[in-house]
Image (cartoon, coloured by chain):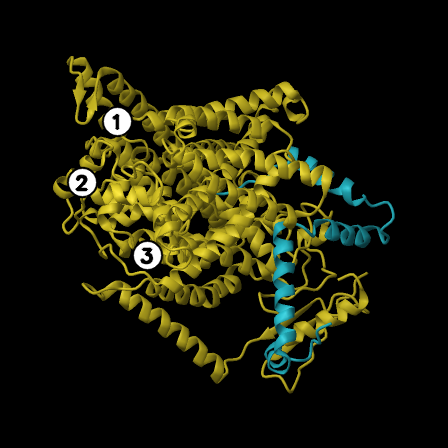
Amino acid sequence: MTSASTHPLERLVRDPWGSLRRGAAGLLWYLKEVMGENAYIHYMESYERRHGTREGAMGEKEFWRDLTDEQDSNPKVRCC
Amino acid sequence: MDIRCEVIELNEEEILSVEYVRTEEGLPPVAVVEKPRWTPVKIVIWVVIALVAAAGWAMVAFVRGEEMSASWFVAAAVGSYLIAFRFYAKFIEWKICRPDPKRATPAELNDNGRDFAPTDRRVLFGHHFAAISGAGPLVGPILAAQMGYLPGTLWIVLGVIVAGGVQDYLVLFFSMRRNGRSLGQMTRDELGRTGGIIASLGIILIMVILIAVLGVVIINALAESPWGVFSIAMTIPIAVFMGIYMRYLRPGKVVEVSVIGIVLLILAIVAGGWVHNSPVWSEFFHLDKVTLAWCLMIYGFLAAVLPVWVLLAPRDYLSTFMKIGTIILLAVGILIVNPSVQMPAVTEFAFNSEGPAFAGALFPFLFITIACGALSGFHALISSGTTPKLIEKESQARLIGYGGMLMESFVAIMALVAAICLDKGLYFAMNAAEPLTGGTAQGASDFINNALGMSGVATSPELLEQAAKDVGEESIVSRTGGAPTLAMGMAHILHNIFGGPAWMSFWYHFAVMFEALFILTTIDAGTRVARFMLSDALGNFSKKFRDPSWTPGAWLTTAIMVGAWGSILLMGVTDPLGGINTLFPLFGISNQLLAAIALAVIFAIVCKMGLARWAWIPGIPLVWDLVVTMAASWQKIFSSDPVLGYWAQHFAYKDALAAGETSLGNTEGIAAMNAVVRNTFVQGTLSIVFALLVAMVVIMAVWKSIEAIRKGSLPTTEEPYTETKIFAPAGLIARKAEREVQAQWDERSPHR
């Protein structure tokens, strides 16, 4: 875990390779988030927030099916 | 529970005063409010940014006659964006929005893990940017380059700061305060039922025009190009394969399937080269504009009625991936290659209305041609409805709304740079309509050398033929619409870094491919959205249309929408006058008129909130936008110059036909003349309808605003205040105190 008290620049100077690794991991995380790969993880988190448990939530495969099927009637606008 | 304890701790060691905001005892703070204090380091940083911007502008605006490099444009633009984001957007935040750190957003209140879900601000920035930016900012600036680089650069940068960013930010903020309601619903709530109906009608009509014109752009790039047609056609099986992969083989592996898709896409581009060289296959994929228009309509229909997972969802993944990739590629290309600018700062076409790429003088048509990148009404449809349901904290709206628009503006600047660094002769040969060039290298060369009406531009048939050969096309003459020019510009820049001259054709088709991908994404999503808007409207008359699973209704509404944009598309691609130069103004006008609706609604809300003092913030862009769009509509409707006015042209051709003539200007034959009469009638009628619809909405908004100013304020339809129970950083970069608070929250819930 990254410690919240040290400044990112300070960490870069102390441990450049670690920073590089964290940077690459961060980029991959960002790509996955923006592309929507983590949608299921977020759904589970949200389910737990709402119900206090993960029991009764959709399975992964079911969730992805439901996600696109729901878009059938709720399309999102894409701009020019 | 009514615990509202606000603990204020002043941290002595910090330079800033820090206020920790709590809404519930026992929970860590929900926000950290810092009062920024100017430190010497900060002052130095902002002075440097201002100097960089000033140096960029000085070079762009005043240096003449010497080789100027493209990076000055980047300096001027990025420096200005940073200053605008830090100062003007912050000013709007203080005076109008006043985000409340204790107030819960719709994402938190209605969290369903789907369309309402608290989303990391950086991720949401990416989502929002991917949704607002497409082919628009890549096309407009290219066409506007005919007036020189200075007018376009000034409008893109100043426009986004004063108009586009303001619209996107305020629509996003107000929609967020209204549970993420759409622009149409907000208009109905704030201006009344009639206003809402008129606005919704306007939105549907405007979408139809947008889709049709984007279709013309892509068909102009693909017609008679076997390479392009093959690689774009291949995106359909690739998308279907990705859809099956995601649904049955490996659900949820979005990045994996996108990477596979991109690899297949690149293979398709390479294979396009083989198709181009094979006499049999190149004949097979050699399609004319009318055939392509029909293909596009069939595709649009299928995409709107098929389940989303088959085509739409995978194509959207591909499109997002390509968007991120190519924009980074273009930015890196411009910064590394640093090409020098060929186009003059201001050309003759800024002062007359004889430019070959689009007709009309600088005012108002520059501001119409460059819509996306400076001010785009379409964004109001995403800033309301989609994005506001995902924001974690009210204070993040500035980053996502205003910041996202700045990013799109930067894309527009890069597109402009790609166009102005091309050889002038090549630029005009590609952008002059076919009636002017005759569609041949000899004809284009004659036109440019003798009849262009701009000094200092020369070319030769050999040069144009070589340019076409370099990019693997039979001809690049009259490849109007902006997309091929951008592709040419990108090929010229990128081959210097990757692959050398042999790769120019690859980069050209790569660029055509991603533009086509963006446009197809807009077309299929747009058709689907428009279909639902129509069934909603028809649902008022027959309840059955409200049911999305009722197949006849879905097919009927889709067919109506496709028929609507398809007929305009066919009209555009068969237009004897060139299509894009007559239709593109209609695209810009309709997009800017949508902005007028959005800005008028914002203006009324600001007045109703009792903030009339600050109503000039949306007021300035509203007035400017109205002046521009109404002046343009006026000219398009009433101008007696047939090059400009739809009706003047309509009657000129009608009279000529009545007099028994068989040709007029460059139009030969009675059939072509009849087509002009018909097309100008449609275009002229649409211009009138749009202008009237928007004028009505604006009048209603002004009426409400006056009433509000008289009474001091009026009740708005903001949702009631609810306290937040979650934490998120206020801006892009989490500050030290925010990181500490985040750590406290992380300890409480191990899943974050």
* Within-10-Å neighbours for mark 3: few <14, some 14–19, many 20+: many
| Residue A37 in sight | yes
Q: Residue B723 placed where, x, y %?
A: 72, 59
Of labels 1 and 2, earlier in sequence is 2
Instruction: Tell me the SS state at disc 2.
Output: helix
Q: In the figure, what tint was chain B given?
A: yellow
Please check whether the numbered discs 1 and 2 fall on a single chain: yes
Q: In the rendered image of this protein, does residue B104 appear above or below residue B259?
A: below
Q: In the rendered image of this protein, does residue B79 appear above or below residue B162?
A: below
Residue B153 tag number: 3
Please check whether the numbered discs 2 and 3 fall on a single chain: yes
| Residue B627 in sight | no
Q: How far apart are marks 1 and 2 (CA)?
A: 32 Å
**In the rendered view of the protein, which quadrant contains the C terminus of chain B?**
bottom right
Q: Distance between the residues labelled 2 and 3?
A: 28 Å
According to the picture, the residue beneath numbered tag 2 turns out to be B445
Out of A38 and B292, give the one closest to the viewer: B292
Of labels 1 and 3, earlier in sequence is 3
* Within-10-Å neighbours for mark 1: few <14, some 14–19, many 20+: many
The amino acid type of the residue labelled 3 equals Thr
> Image check: B616 left or right of B533?
left
Instruction: Tell me the SS state at disc 3.
Output: helix
* Numbered disc in front, either 1 or 3: 3
According to the picture, the residue beneath numbered tag 1 turns out to be B647
* Within-10-Å neighbours for mark 2: few <14, some 14–19, many 20+: many
Q: In the figure, what tint was chain A given?
A: cyan
The chain letter for the residue carrying disc 2 is B
Q: Residue B26 placed where, x, y %?
A: 82, 69
> Image check: B53 left or right of B403?
left
Q: Image point 31% across, 66% down: which residue? A: B57
Q: Which residue lies furthest to the left in this view?
A: B450
The amino acid type of the residue labelled 2 equals Ser
